[in-house]
Image (cartoon, grey):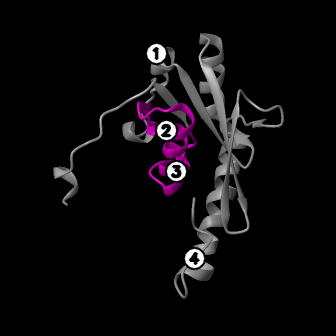
């Protein structure tokens, strides 16, 4: 059926704040993250930052019962780092979702709290990480997608 005529599902469960890097906004990975949150926390009541564009939504953290922080390749971007620190100060439960690639597959690892080995990037490190990450994906498109399709492009 046409999307705008589709009935929206009601939100259920505790209010969860999703903290993710901006390069994951509106991707299949973001959809998978929402499914994992529903499975692990039993909630579809999730604040998804991509729904707000680049506007700051961190003021809503104080209302959340849980914050799910996404660490791509074991790294928190500067935005995610700030939001995790704020959630900890406010006493909000923090969960970490680690994302990695195993060959052509994405691997998701859910943990309570923040693992000790997660790297907290500052703004300059985040810019460099984002450039490298996006360039690697873009180069894969140039090499494969135009001819045979990219199997790696799953983020």
The residue mark sitting in front, 2 or 1, is 2
Total numbered labels placed on residues in the image: 4
Tell whether 24 sits left or right of 106: left
The residue mark sitting in front, 4 or 2, is 2
Furthest toward the left, the residue is 5
The region drawn magenta spans 20-49
Is disc 2 placed on a helix, strand or loop? helix
Query: Which label's residue is closer to the chain start, 3 or 1?
Result: 3
Residue that numbered label 1 is attached to: 63
86 and 103: which one is in front?
Answer: 103
The residue mark sitting in front, 2 or 3, is 2
Residue that numbered label 3 is attached to: 32
Residue at the image point whose x is 64% and y is 25% from the top: 94
Residue at the image point whose x is 69% and y is 57% from the top: 132
Query: Which label's residue is closer to the chain start, 1 or 4?
Result: 1
Q: Is residue 57 above or below residue 147?
A: above
Query: Which label's residue is closer to the chain start, 3 or 4?
Result: 3
Distance between the alpha carbons at the discs numbered 3 and 1: 24 Å
Query: Which label's residue is closer to the chain start, 2 or 3?
Result: 3
Residue that numbered label 2 is attached to: 38
Query: Which label's residue is closer to the chain start, 4 or 2?
Result: 2
Distance between the alpha carbons at the discs numbered 3 and 4: 19 Å
**Mark 3 and 1 residues: CB-CB less than 8 Å, in contact?**
no
Using the rendered view, name the quadrant where residue 138 is placed: bottom right
**Residue 21, x across and y down, in percent:** 58, 42
**Residue 75, x across and y down, in percent:** 73, 42
Is 19 within the magenta? no
Residue that numbered label 4 is attached to: 150
Distance between the alpha carbons at the discs numbered 1 and 4: 41 Å
């Amino acid at each position: 059926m046409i999307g705008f005529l589709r009935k929206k599902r009601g939100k259920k469960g505790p209010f969860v704040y999703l903290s993710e890097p901006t390069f994951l906004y509106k991707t299949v990975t973001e959809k998978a993250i929402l499914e994992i949150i529903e499975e692990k926390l039993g909630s579809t009541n999730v604040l998804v930052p991509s729904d707000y564009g680049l506007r700051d939504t961190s003021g809503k953290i104080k209302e959340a019962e849980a914050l799910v922080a996404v660490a791509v390749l074991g790294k928190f971007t500067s935005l995610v780092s700030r939001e995790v620190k704020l959630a900890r100060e406010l006493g909000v439960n923090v969960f970490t979702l680690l994302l990695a690639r195993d060959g052509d597959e994405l691997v998701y690892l859910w943990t309570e709290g923040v693992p000790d080995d997660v790297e907290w990037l500052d703004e300059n490190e985040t810019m460099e990480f984002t450039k490298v990450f996006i360039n690697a994906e873009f180069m894969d498109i140039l090499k494969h997608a135009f001819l045979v399709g990219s199997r790696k492009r799953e983020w």
